[in-house]
Amino acid sequence: MTLLEVEDVRRTFGGIVALDGVTFDVTAGETHVVMGANGAGKTTLFNCITGYYRPDSGTVRYRGEDITGMRADRTARLGIRRTFQEVDVFDELTVAENISLASFETQPREIMARLDLIEIHDKYGDELTLFERKRVALALVTDGDLLLLDEVFSGVNPSEKPAMLGYLEELARDHTLVLIEHDIETAFELADRMVVLDQGRVLAHGSPGEIRTDETVQEQYLGEMAI
Ligand SMILES: Nc1ncnc2c1ncn2[C@@H]1O[C@H](COP(=O)(O)OP(=O)(O)OP(=O)(O)O)[C@@H](O)[C@H]1O
């Protein structure tokens, strides 16, 4: 089943065309990676899906419903949640308190167990390591169905990466994930399908195998990189 459809979405900022007719879809249950160089339009795409920005034109559908321009609090209520590059955890609240604020249907304890947060449930936000903060940020969105995750791995130590991959695989068991990921190796490891953006346009959309062998992607994005 198609969960999310983005059709011909355009968004400009003054003279800057951040999204220039972006079309792609996300199937329920898959892990979908959004790739692209700095400024390609990845964050703007997330903002247009979640309702932080209204597209100038084009359509966003979720479960077949037109949600174009719907406010972020309403898309959240429909089950679309996102994390931000800047981790969004309240410093003056404990881990358990942060999670209680964000979970409506799932028990906070159940959410904390999935991300190994029970042992640190009484630590305050400003006492957490970056890896712990990132796990809390993931925990904060698990109550949704479609999770848009912005650069989950940035700043995570290489030694912590396998554990983070494990958490994402665990969440992928009962969520649909769309991830912005810069690290190409990680992107290929995680993705069921991928969309590559280039200057606001879709350069390619397909399975990791299709992306790997796509000549335009090779030329314009992956270059000489051996993947
Ligand atoms: N609020 C804004 N006001 C003006 N220009 C913006 C705004 N948001 C994004 N842009 C511009 O739109 C283009 C796409 O930006 P966007 O942040 O979506 O790219 P990105 O792929 O997420 O980049 P990065 O990987 O650096 O986060 C860039 O040229 C950016 O400068």
Image (spheres, rainbow, N blue to C red):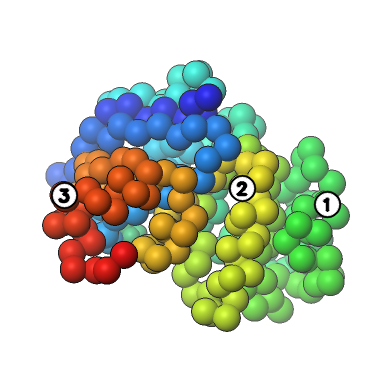
Question: Where residue 19 appears, x then y in whole percent?
Answer: 26, 41
The crowding category of the residue bearing disc 3, from other C-alpha atoms within 10 Å (few below 14, some 14 to 19, many at least 20), is few
83 on left or right of 225: right
Marks 2 and 1, the one that precedes in the sequence? 1
The kind of residue on which mark 1 rests is Glu
Q: Which residue is drawn at 46% across and 59% down?
A: 189
Check disc 2 and report the residue beneath it: 172
Q: Residue at x 21, y 52 (%)?
A: 217
The kind of residue on which mark 2 rests is Ala
Question: Where residue 68 appears, x then y in whole percent?
Answer: 42, 26
Q: Which residue is drawn at 31% across and 65% down?
A: 227
Residue 220: quadrant of the picture: bottom left
Q: Which numbered dot is residue 127?
A: none
* Front-lying residue, 202 or 39: 202
Asked if 152 appears above or below 215 in the picture, the reply is below
Check disc 3 and report the residue beneath it: 216
Report helix, strand or loop for mark 1: helix
Determine whether the beta carbon of the residue marked 1 sits less than 8 angstroms from the nearest atom of ligand 1. no
The kind of residue on which mark 3 rests is Thr
Residue 89 in view of the camera: no
Residue 121: quadrant of the picture: bottom right
Marks 2 and 3, the one that precedes in the sequence? 2
Q: Nearer the viewer, mark 2 or mark 1?
A: 2
Report helix, strand or loop for mark 2: helix
Asked if 134 appears above or below 63 in the picture, the reply is below
Question: Where residue 52 appears, x then y in whole percent?
Answer: 45, 41
